[in-house]
Image (tube, rainbow, N blue to C red):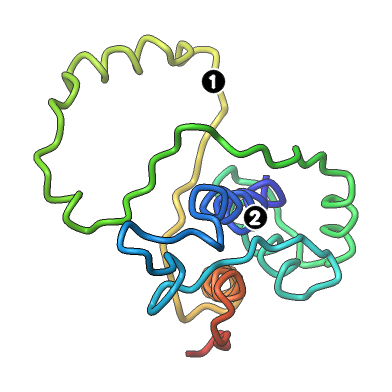
Amino acid sequence: WARLKFEELFHNQIAQLVYNFPLDMVTSSGTPFWSGPKRPPTPLQFNADDPLHLGFIIAAANLRAFNYGLKGSRDPAVFKKAVEATMVPEFVPKQGVRIQTDPKEGEKPPEAAPDEDEECENILKSLPPPSSLAGYRMVPVEFEKDDDTNFHIDFIAAASNLRARNYKIAEADNHR
């Protein structure tokens, strides 16, 4: 799960953005799209030998394990072995994806929202019966920034620094 999440967040979303807005794109006024405050991002290629990449995997996997009541691990060798065995689908750009570029677009009145009661009813119908989930429990994570053993700050720092790498922005340490 964590390896696929890395791919989604730090490779595929960025690759989709660059697909929609190529590096040589110009605006309707003829200026380069990627100029001024807009830095062109670069999709990251996962590397298990990069401590930041593996740190994200370890933190994300341990947070997810906690949710499911599973025992986590801190052993990088365990995670390296797992990511090597993970089948990661090749990125294929999605056609017709619309990404907002003009903040004024967000000011347009939203389209009529679907009926919430109907949507909730449809979701409830799609759930398995409670009897089929006997013994299954999920545990919520309570955020605690001062506990260095719970992976919360490790996850936030890794995710932030990976996004900084996408945009070639200086990375920060865990205590900033």
Q: Earlier in the sequence, mark 2 or mark 1?
A: 2
**In this rendering, position of residue 41 left or right of residue 26:** right
**In this rendering, position of residue 111 left or right of residue 87:** left
Q: Nearer the viewer, mark 2 or mark 1?
A: 2
**In this rendering, position of residue 176 left or right of residue 66:** left
When the figure is inspected, residue 48 is found, relative to residue 20, above or below; the finding is below
**In this rendering, position of residue 64 left or right of residue 89:** left
Name, please, the residue furthest toward the front. Answer: 30
Residue 3 x, y percent position in the rendering: 72, 51
For the point 57% across and 56% down, which residue is it? 14
Circles 2 and 1: CB distance less than 8 Å? no
When the figure is inspected, residue 161 is found, relative to residue 105, above or below; the finding is below
When the figure is inspected, residue 133 is found, relative to residue 174, above or below; the finding is above
Residue 84 x, y percent position in the rendering: 89, 51
For the point 55% across and 13% down, which residue is it? 132
Residue position for label 1: 133
Q: Tell me the amino acid under the disc marked 2.
A: His
Residue position for label 2: 11
Q: Tell me the amino acid under the disc marked 1.
A: Leu
When the figure is inspected, residue 21 is found, relative to residue 74, above or below; the finding is above
Dot 2: what SS?
Answer: helix
For the point 44% across and 37% down, which residue is it? 97
Dot 1: what SS?
Answer: helix
- Marks 2 and 1 sit apart, C-alpha to C-alpha, by 35 Å
